[in-house]
Every structure is written in C-alpha cells, then in structure tokens.
Amino acid sequence: MSRPAAPETRTSRLPGDGPQVHGDCRQVQGGLGLILLTALPWRPVATASIAALSVLSLVAIWPDSAFSRVGIGLTLVCLAAAASFILDEPAAAAVDSVPRTLRARTAVRLVCLALPASTGALGFLVIGERLSSTPDHGLPYRGLLLLMAGCLLLGLATASFARRFTPEPGELASSIVAGLLATVIVYNPLSRWVDVFPLSPQDRWSRAVVLWVVVCAVCIVSLARTTRDPLK
C-alpha cells in the first residue's frame, strides 16, 4: 500500500514584495534628502539676500546719484556673503552619519543658492531698466549676471575649502570674501590692466568678462576638488 504524498509546502510571496523593497529604499533616500534640505542654513542666506535686495532698492530709487556705483558693488558683496553660508552644517556629527557622499550633500545644499541668485538676477533686471534711462548709465544685464555668478561661486568655493577645517565655514568665508571684494571695489588695484568691477558703460567690460570667466572656471574646479570625500 503506497504512502500518501506529503503535502507540498509553498511559501506564498505577495505580489508587491519585490517592488516594496525598492519602494522602501526610495522612501529612505527621499527621507535623507528631506533631512538634508531642512538642515540648510536658510536664515543667514536669506538675511544677506534681503540686504542685497535692500541696497538694490536704494539704487533703483536714486539711479543718477553717486551711490548707484557703490550700491551695485555692495550688492555683489552681500550676494557673495550669502553664498558663503550655504555649506554651514551645525549638526555635522549627525549629517556625517548620513550614507551620502560629501559631493551629494553639497549638491543638495546648492538648492539654497537659488535664493541669492534669483534675488540678484531680479534686482539687476529692475535697476538695469532704471539706469538705462539716465544719461551716464546703461549697464549690460548679461555683464551684471556674470559678475554676480563670479561672486556667488567665489563665496561658495571659499566656504567649501574652509569646510575642511570647520563644519560652519560661513562666518570665516564671508569675512574673507567680503573683505577681498570690498578692497577691490574701493581701491581697484588692477586698474592698470582691467576694471574688475566695471560698473559703468565707460569701463573696460571686455577684459572684465575674460577675468570673471576665468574666476568662475577656477571656482568650479576648486569646488570639484574640495567636495571629494577625504578618503578619496
């Protein structure tokens, strides 16, 4: 007499088991991105951006005054200072435990760069129209955008280098960048060869464009090197 066959045991697999694993990974990655996003230093960046917008408002109110040239330079200093605070990480011990590379965390923080960039772009567009109506002005908008991009990248690259030594490089980097830019604006030490900040149509814009393109390129290369993980 044959023995009855043992009942076959099957492990039932829910249809959503496989995708659920990937979904959980995506959810975790999204949660990490949200944590990094909420850890951004919005307050100092917003404060410096508002200061830049306030100075530009004064330039727009009195476009034909002697303050307009100084005001545009001071605006660029404020925007560079705003970019210097973007890489501040007050909770560095907790952030370093997040399974993401330093370059990935830096890329998330670049979202904060949109605030000073949009503030400067909009403000320069407004004062460009105001200054173009005065006989002694009429600044090229693309030239102002290049100056702004160079100052933002300079502040960001300085903070990225200083982050190797301190988790909150904003104050140090902003002091260095603001002091450097203010010195160049006031004393213009390279006036024999180039107008570093050509803030009037009579200045040598062509040489300044070359200079600031080089500055932007050097800052981008510096960012690429200083955002590598220390062990790489």
Image (cartoon, grey):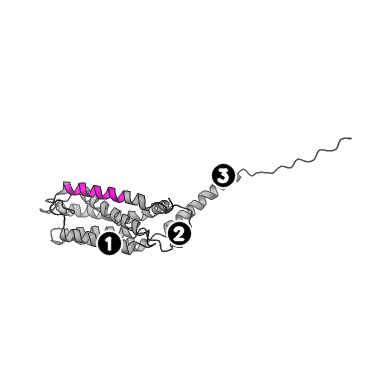
Quote the CA–CA distance across marks 2 and 3.
28 Å
Q: Which residue does the numbered mark 2 point to in the structure image?
A: 95
Q: Judge from the rendering whether residue 99 lies leftward or rightward of residue 61; answer left or right.
A: right
Residue 81 spot, x, y in % from top left: 29, 60
Mark 2: amino acid: Val
Q: Earlier in the sequence, mark 2 or mark 3?
A: 3
Front position among marks 1 and 2: 1
Front position among marks 2 and 3: 2
The quadrant the N terminus occupies is top right
Q: Earlier in the sequence, mark 3 or mark 1?
A: 3
Q: Residues within 10 Å of mark 2 (few under 14, many from 20)?
A: some
Residue 126 spot, x, y in % from top left: 22, 54
Q: Residues within 10 Å of mark 1 (few under 14, many from 20)?
A: some
Residue 143 in view in this figure: yes
Main SS type for the magenta part? helix
Q: Which residue does the numbered mark 3 point to in the structure image?
A: 19
Q: Which residue does the numbered mark 1 point to in the structure image?
A: 176
Q: Is residue 80 magenta?
A: no
Q: Secondary structure at mark 2?
A: helix
> Magenta residues?
207-220
Mark 1: amino acid: Ile
Quote the CA–CA distance across marks 1 and 2.
26 Å
Q: Is residue 214 magenta?
A: yes
**Residue appearing at x 22%, y 62% in the figure:** 55
Q: Residue furthest top?
A: 1
Mark 3: amino acid: Pro
Relative height, residue 76 to residue 18 (above, below):
below
Q: Judge from the rendering whether residue 100 lies leftward or rightward of residue 87; answer left or right.
A: right
